[in-house]
Image (spheres, rainbow, N blue to C red):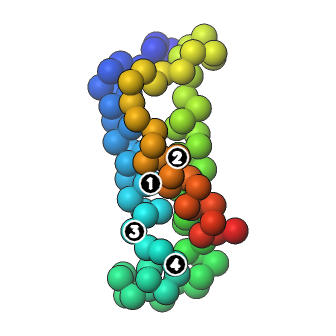
Amino acid sequence: MEEKTADEIAAIYTAAGHSVNVINADANYSAYTTRTGYSDPEAEWKAMIERNVKHLEIIKDYKKLDETTSIWTSESFTDIDAAITKGKTLYS
């Protein structure tokens, strides 16, 4: 296995942004059902939020092949950290 390229790292960071958007799209389950028109059970909505939070936590922890050094350099994690915090309140 080789180290991730700059393009691969950028793609991972973009994927993190998608999870941030999912978490931030709605303030609560009612807002989700109103916005989307879906009538998924609230438990399924909470599970979706939790999956996205876990996704962000995994992405934040990505390491280089040495398993010690982060792949991240100058990327901002402000929005990601905020989404993790918000997401945890939504599914707890």
Q: Earlier in the sequence, mark 4 or mark 2?
A: 4
Q: Residue at x 58, y 85 (%)?
A: 41
* Residue ID for mark 4: 28
Q: The disc labelled 4 sits on which kind of residue?
A: Asn
Label 3 to label 4: alpha-carbon separation: 9 Å
Q: Earlier in the sequence, mark 3 or mark 2?
A: 3
Residue 15 image position (x, y, % from top left): 39, 45
Marks 4 and 2 in Cβ contact (< 8 Å): no
Q: Nearer the viewer, mark 4 or mark 1?
A: 4
Q: Relative to 69, say whether 23 is above or below.
A: below
Q: Earlier in the sequence, mark 3 or mark 1?
A: 1
Label 4 to label 1: alpha-carbon separation: 16 Å
Label 3 to label 1: alpha-carbon separation: 10 Å
Q: Relative to 40, say whether 63 is above or below.
A: above
Q: The disc labelled 3 sits on which kind of residue?
A: Ala
Local SS, label 4: loop
* Residue ID for mark 1: 19
Q: Is residue 92 left or right of residue 50?
A: right
Q: Is residue 23 left or right of residue 65?
A: left
Label 4 to label 2: alpha-carbon separation: 18 Å
Q: Is residue 28 visible?
A: yes
